[in-house]
Amino acid sequence: MNQFVDDDVNDDFSKLNIDEKTIYNQPRANENDRNKNFQRGFNSNFNKQYDDYGNRNNRGRWNNSRYQKNYRNYGSNSSNDKPINHGFDEAHKFSVNKYKNNYRDNRNNNDSRGFDQRPNNHISSNEPVMTPEDPELERELFTNENVGINFGKYDDIPVKISGNNVPKPLDDFESIQLGPILNNNIRLCKYTIPTPVQKYAIPTLKSGRDIMACAQTGSGKTASFLIPILYKLSMLPEMINRYKRKRGPQNPFALVLAPTRELAIQIYEEARKVTYRSQVKPVVIYGGASQYDQSRQLSEGADLIIATPGRLIDFINRHKIYLNRIKCLCLDEADRMLDMGFEPQIREIIEASQMPGTGMRQTMMFSATFPKEIQEMASRYLNDYVYLTVGRVGSTTDNIKQELVWVEDENKLEKLMEYLPSAKDKELMLVFVEMKRGADFLEYTLFKRKYPVVALHGDKCQAERELALRKFKSGQFPVMIATAVAARGLDIPNVRYVINYDLPSDIQEYVHRIGRTGRVGNLGTAISFFNKKNGNIADGLTKLLNENNQELPMWISDVVDSNRFKAGFKNRKYQNSRFGNNDFRKQNGNNNINSNNGWNRNPSVSWWNNE
């Protein structure tokens, strides 16, 4: 690191091919022009900069080594050289080019005038800025490994896709150009083989298309939308050319909406991995936590916001967030986001704010189920979208073993304790109940009997919920009693057992619950306590277990027969809707939508050429 003082400057003038009087007699630059030139560097009028740095009265301002090095290296000792004709002489232009090269080569020098110290590729290419490595952060983000994944099952998973001009699927992550930042992060995440939903969704979103994707929870949906979002944001001029964020209200480029706080936090943690060493800054906001802390974090900059609808609307109304620059909008667990409880909030966010309209932004929706009613509602926010359905990774007996056990309500507690010893070592057990007070009762009762249990439900404050999840994930408390708040989207490793202490009334909720085990090919067991109160779901369960080659108890057929009409009415949405395997546009007679005409295993390139 070279630093010069004024005495060095006097010694260096003898080496220059510039007449000393020519330099010293130049008029002094205007202060405003000088300040502008400091910001613009040598891209501005060089004549003013030369006068500024060459003026005798400004010699004391020469505290940057690069400017002096420019004069030292490219001067001449010859006393016969003519003075430079400022701004026009070829030698002068040559000196400017040499300065620029010198600026790149000396990027590690201290710059007292505030110039950005940026890597070479920032100046010489269109690649996004790649920030330096952070070993401590890298260990924090990428220590977890996906163990036990049965990648061989991927080749047997049925896939159905429809839409116009659907992009070809990717075979591996190396076959698609994502840039050095994403390639590095994918390697650190240990993503080796793309899951089926990633294989089709990533190239579709990378091409700029909207998508409605239906795949089982735990099949890699989060990475399916985060990777294309980061790719799109990384190609923005703000990411290629280092920019300084403004403090205060934020105007993000991408927005991800989630129905629960836990899912929002989980997506944020995955976003931190995908955005590592990039300029894209993710921020998460959700209800139940301090607005002041979230507002302060938000004011420091946010390019990608992950939010729950209620807290986002609150920040929009308080003018903390503006959405008029949104390039990408994603709804995770979109079927729940668009149901009777959330749809008005989603409409307010999309339509009442200044968010770019359909066709002006890229919209993506992911869920494990997409009934026809939700498809019709979601299509309002999508433009010429691709519809993708992927069969569940755990759809065979080798992945999730599903059991139905007849248990009367008064015997459920004793029956549960028969299974609790199975929750040992690092194998976790998740027990679902319908009511919050039921979760508290089970937690209290089992804890008194010396079982390491913890409860999770909506009445607990955010700090209690986060603490419960940490203790459960770490194995300190290997049994968690939870309501449906934990059933949607949470990625909890090593959950070997899911017990439906209380069965849900809707078959789609059952699908989400059992998706907590057997994630991404890992083995798991789902046990459900059944009695006469659950007759309305019997028909859906029978179809579900038959589809997955599961063993059915003898008594289930009698329950189905006795509740045939009642169960058929209450579960009417189950028909052809478990994975939303039918594009409702085809059902409505839209013949302009292309599809592969049925379920396919390992779709070949020739199929795509037939589109």
Image (tube, grey):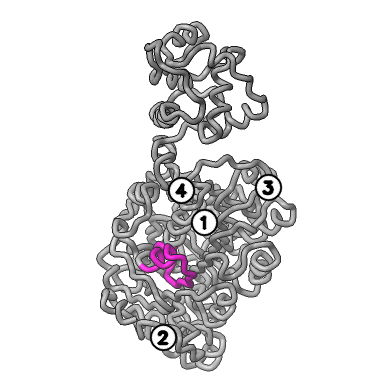
Name the residue tied to disc 4.
275
Marks 1 and 3 in Cβ contact (< 8 Å):
no
Point out the residue furthest to the right here. 318
382 on left or right of 298: left
User: Is residue 244 in the magenta section?
Assistant: no
Q: Badge 1 local density, few (<14 within 10 Å), some, or many (20+)?
A: some
Q: Which residue is mark 2?
A: 555
Whether residue 342 is situated above or below residue 247 in the rendered picture: below
Which amino acid, mark 1? Answer: Leu
Asked if marks 4 and 1 touch (Cβ < 8 Å), the reply is no
Residue at x 50%, y 85% (from the top left corner):
585
Q: Earlier in the sequence, mark 3 or mark 4?
A: 3
Is label 2 in a helix, a strand or a loop? loop
- Kind of residue indicated by mark 4: Thr
| Residue 532 higher or lower than 80, as above or below | below
The dot on residue 249 is 3
How far across and down, in percent of the image, does residue 73 sit?
38, 19
For the residues labelled 1 and 3, the Cα–Cα distance comes to 48 Å
Amino acid type shown at disc 2 = Trp
Which portion, as a residue range, is magenta? 200-221
Label for residue 446?
1
How would you rate the neighbour count of disc 4 (Cα within 10 Å): few for under 14, some for 14-19, many for 20 or more?
many
Q: Earlier in the sequence, mark 1 or mark 3?
A: 3
Disc 3 crowd rating (10 Å Cα; few below 14, some 14-19, many 20+) is: some
